[in-house]
Amino acid sequence: MPEAYAHRPIHTKCYYLNIENILSQTMNRKQAHWVLQKIARELQQGIFPVDKTMSAQEVEMWMRV
């Protein structure tokens, strides 16, 4: 996983805010599980935003894909 983030640098304030904002949009356990799997994939690919807080619109769009 050469594109993946190193573990420690991802734990930024923006990272936690993005996780919280995304999870707050989930409606049930199944959707929360799907969201966490998607976040994990994006972290492995190095594309999950860890240094920029996502806007409400970005979170909404992220949930659709």
Image: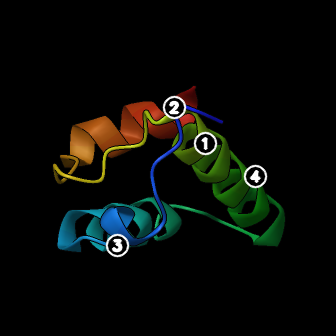
Question: Where does label 3 land, which residue?
Answer: 11
Query: Mark 2 is on which residue type?
Result: Glu
Q: Nearer the viewer, mark 4 or mark 2?
A: 2
Residue appearing at x 46%, y 36% in the figure: 46
Q: Is residue 42 above or below residue 30?
A: above
Tell me the quarter of the image containing the C terminus.
top right
Query: Mark 3 is on which residue type?
Result: His
Query: Mark 1 is on which residue type?
Result: Gln
Query: Mark 4 is on which residue type?
Result: Trp
Is the Cβ of the residue at disc 1 closer than 8 Å to that at disc 3? Answer: no
Question: Where does label 2 land, which residue?
Answer: 3
In front of the other: 47 or 55: 47
**Gap between marks 4 and 3 measured at Cα:** 21 Å
Tell me residue 16's x, y (percent).
33, 73
Secondary element under disc 3, as helix, strand or loop, is: loop
Secondary element under disc 4, as helix, strand or loop, is: helix
Question: Where does label 4 land, which residue?
Answer: 34
Tell me residue 41's x, y (percent).
66, 41
**Gap between marks 2 and 3 measured at Cα:** 17 Å
Residue appearing at x 60%, y 42% in the figure: 44
First along the sequence among labels 1 and 3: 3
Q: Is residue 23 above or below residue 31?
A: below
Q: Is residue 2 above or below residue 23?
A: above
Q: Quadrant of residue 12?
A: bottom left
Residue appearing at x 59%, y 63% in the figure: 26
Residue appearing at x 69%, y 65% in the figure: 32
Q: Nearer the viewer, mark 4 or mark 3?
A: 3
First along the sequence among labels 2 and 1: 2
Question: Where does label 1 land, which residue?
Answer: 44
